[in-house]
Amino acid sequence: MADGDGGGGGNTGIVAIVVIFVIVLILGFLAYRGGMFGGRGGGTNINVNVGGGGSNR
């Protein structure tokens, strides 16, 4: 009767690690979507100018 937690105290650390991991994944995904790491539109704005200022013939 002295053991009040029923022996389930060992799972608390595992649950805490999983919850923290899920939170980090969600925050990382939101940061990626927000463009913090160059996601969404990083590198699609390509401007190519081929000379037109002089006569190359």
Image (cartoon, rainbow, N blue to C red):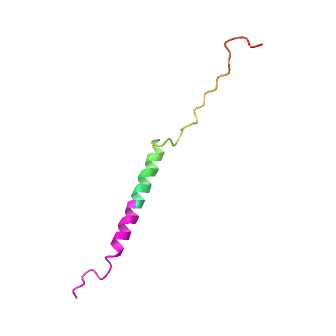
Image quarter where the C terminus lies is top right
At which x and y percent is residue 13?
A: 34, 70
At which x and y percent is residue 39?
A: 51, 43
Height in image: 47 above or below 18?
above
Image quadrant of residue 6?
Answer: bottom left
Q: Residue furthest right?
A: 57
Height in image: 21 above or below 43?
below
Image quadrant of residue 55?
Answer: top right
- The reply to whether the magenta stretch includes residue 14 is yes
- The reply to whether the magenta stretch includes residue 11 is yes
Residue at position x 68%, y 18% in the image: 51
Seen in the image, is 8 located left or right of residue 24? left
Q: Nearer the viewer, residue 56 or 35?
A: 56
Seen in the image, is 12 located left or right of residue 45? left
Height in image: 28 above or below 13?
above
Residue at position x 21%, y 86% in the image: 2
> Which contiguous range is marked in magenta?
1-20
Q: Residue furthest left?
A: 2
Image quarter where the N terminus lies is bottom left
Height in image: 39 above or below 22?
above
Residue at position x 44%, y 56% in the image: 25
